Amino acid sequence: MLTRLKTYTWLFALLLLPYLVLCVFARPVADDLTYSFKTICWGFWHAQQHDFMYWNGRYTSNAIMLANPMVWGSVMAYKLAAVALILLTPVTFYFFLSAFFKNEFSALQKLIGALAFTLLYFGLMPDIAEGIYWYTGAMTYVLANLLTLVYISFVAMYLQKRYIINRFIHGLKCIALLFIVIGFNEVNTLILIAGHAIVLMAIRKEKSLRPALFILSVLTTLFALIMILAPGNAQRGSYFTENYHMLHSLGMSVLQVARFFVKWVAFPPLLLASVLFIPIGQKLYGQSAFFRQLCGIKLWQVFLMLCGIIFLCVFPAYWGTGILGQHRTLNTASFFFIPVWFLFVFIAAKQFGATNYAIAVPVKMQHMLVLIFMACLLFSGNSGSAIIELGSGEAYKYTAEMDARTTLLENAKAQNLKKLIMPSIKNRPACLFVLDASADPGNGINTSYAVYYGINTIETDNTK
């Protein structure tokens, strides 16, 4: 048994390789350059104050953006940021499992679970280019997801009276983490507000737990108001003319909920993982009082939670801009969708008597299903795309174009050119490509290059 677990651990870890190799080809673009320019020209604190007053209230993510590696012109540090994010994901989920199921699983089992979750998340992620390889998108949303999970874990430990140092310091850590996470973006904030409200309703009879969670709920609202009422939000909203239409925002959000719910549930690795989770869930049901409590939630309520997670991650985009112009926010939705989906699957299996059939599956068959699951993780979803882009040379060609562009821009800066026409990017691998400049010098991407390299006007040779 131990040998098999070790084998699984190594195999799951190896499945991260395509994602890690792609980090070599990551290159800065768009907001990476704009934020770096602000820090270089104004200084970190002045730039932070400026963005809070005139752009948005995201005090945490703005600070991280303003500390972008491109402030020092370090492309190597930019790549390493993506590597760090990939490696931090299983570490964070391991911590989460340890907080909730300290004694139910061995260290090796928790590590396998953490790696499996990471691979499911990376494979399912709607926009992996903006989720891992673009510093601005990755730090604003995916890092926020990881810290949200750490916050949830700290709160769980507090409620179990498992304090790091002592109760007072552990409580302060929970509050500090909450403040930090709220400052990342709107969707994580909404999820935390909704999550606190749901938990408070669920434990309304638990008098010993209510005070701490009530205080955290109030603080969540107060911290959220700091971001929402920031002067910069009103300024930013003025750039969009089709925003703040309630019926349109609600209608389009509901359609996107249906779209992504079906798309994610039909993801082959998630379907296989669901089957594999049923016997694991049965073990947890017998050993964990917390998991048994979770399984007391009605099936329709968990279904609404799944839909609510997606809704909370798409509605702000429609409300604030009128469109779902990017899928960065859905990278957050898929992160929280996966664990809640497993809860839904087990409750459904329990309700319809399928748990006994799952337990009766022979060990050899379970082993075969795990290997098939690994193969699906490797060759489907974003991992499959990464392998194709690496094997075909598309990732290398994209990076070569981006490096040639950087050389062109640096030469233009050295020559003090006032106008530059540069080639558009022809190779656009889905796992790496985020945005490109256009023939319009007023385009936001064009101006990002222009301000960072000190060139008045930048255009591309076509509009592709």
Image (cartoon, rainbow, N blue to C red):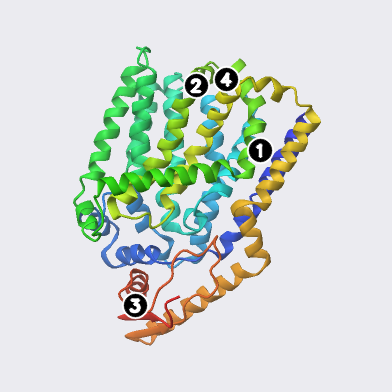
Question: Looking at numbered disc 2 in the image, what kind of residue is underneath it?
Answer: Leu
Q: How many angstroms separate mark 4 from mark 1 (CA)?
A: 20 Å
Q: Earlier in the sequence, mark 4 or mark 1?
A: 1
Horizontally, residue 200 falls left or right of residue 342, namely left
Where is the N terminus found, in terms of image quarters? Answer: top right
Nearest the viewer among 270 and 38 is 270
Circle on res. 226: none
Give the structural element (helix, strand or loop) at label 1: helix
**Number of residues whose C-alpha sits closer than 10 Å to that of mark 1, classed few (under 14), some (14–19) or many (20 or more):** some
**Which residue does the numbered mark 3 point to in the structure image?**
440
User: What whole-number distance in Å separates the C-alpha atoms at marks 3 and 4?
Assistant: 58 Å
Residue assigned mark 4: 351
**In this rendering, does residue 20 appear at all?**
yes
Q: CA distance from mark 2 to mark 1?
A: 22 Å
- Taking the spot 51% from the left edge, 79% from the top edge, the residue there is 404
Residue identifier under label 1: 272
Residue placed under numbered mark 2 in the picture: 294
**Residue 345 against residue 138 in the figure, above or below:** above
Q: Earlier in the sequence, mark 1 or mark 3?
A: 1
